[in-house]
Amino acid sequence: MPLYKEMIYLGCKTNRVVIVQEAVRRGGVASDIASIIQAEAFYDLDAPIEIVAGLNIPVPFNLELEKASVPQVDDIVVASRRTLHATSFALAAE
């Protein structure tokens, strides 16, 4: 399956990256995308890459438990806010 790295780099133009996937983090495509960004566009980033992924458990059959095991809007918002405030934390540490 082809992977268009140019499209990934275009997604980095805000200098902050949040990658979301329903699958678990280990072995997922989000980790591969993050490693590509780290290797090729690290110095363009203003904050660490955030990966929002499903819990490392089998997907439950119950709908409410399934919702709890995959990323929700609130999880994405929290990760996005962390990337926005990462530079202020770095400046405060200096």
Image (cartoon, grey):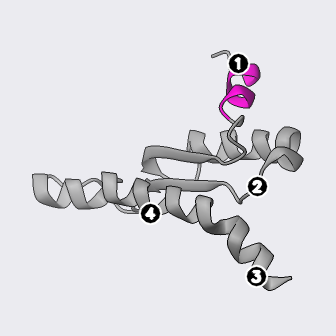
User: Quick one: label 3 or label 2, which is nearer the N terminus?
Assistant: 2
Residue 6 covered by magenta stretch: yes
Give the CA separation, mark 1 to mark 3. Answer: 37 Å
Badge 4 amino acid: Val
Badge 3 amino acid: Ala
User: Quick one: label 1 or label 2, which is nearer the N terminus?
Assistant: 1
Taking the spot 48% from the left edge, 55% from the top edge, the residue there is 52
Residue toward you, 10 or 91 = 91
Where residue 54 sits, quadrant-wise, is bottom left
Give the mark toward the camera: 1 or 3.
Answer: 3
Residue linked to disc 2: 46
Q: Residue 92 carries which label?
A: 3
Under circle 4, the secondary element is helix
Residue 90 spot, x, y in % from top left: 77, 74
* Horizontal arrangement in the rendering, residue 17 relative to residue 65 (left or right): right
User: Quick one: label 4 or label 2, which is nearer the N terminus?
Assistant: 2
Give the mark toward the camera: 3 or 4.
Answer: 3
Under circle 3, the secondary element is helix
Taking the spot 71% from the left edge, 60% from the top edge, the residue there is 48
The answer to whether 40 is drawn above or below residue 55 in the figure is above
Residue 16 covered by magenta stretch: no
Residue linked to disc 4: 78
State which region is magenta: 5-11
Under circle 1, the secondary element is loop
Give the CA separation, mark 4 to mark 2. Answer: 17 Å
* Horizontal arrangement in the rendering, residue 28 relative to residue 37 (left or right): left
Q: For the residue carrying disc 2, how many other residues have a C-alpha within 10 Å: few (<14), some (14-19), or many (20+)?
A: some
Residue 75 spot, x, y in % from top left: 38, 60
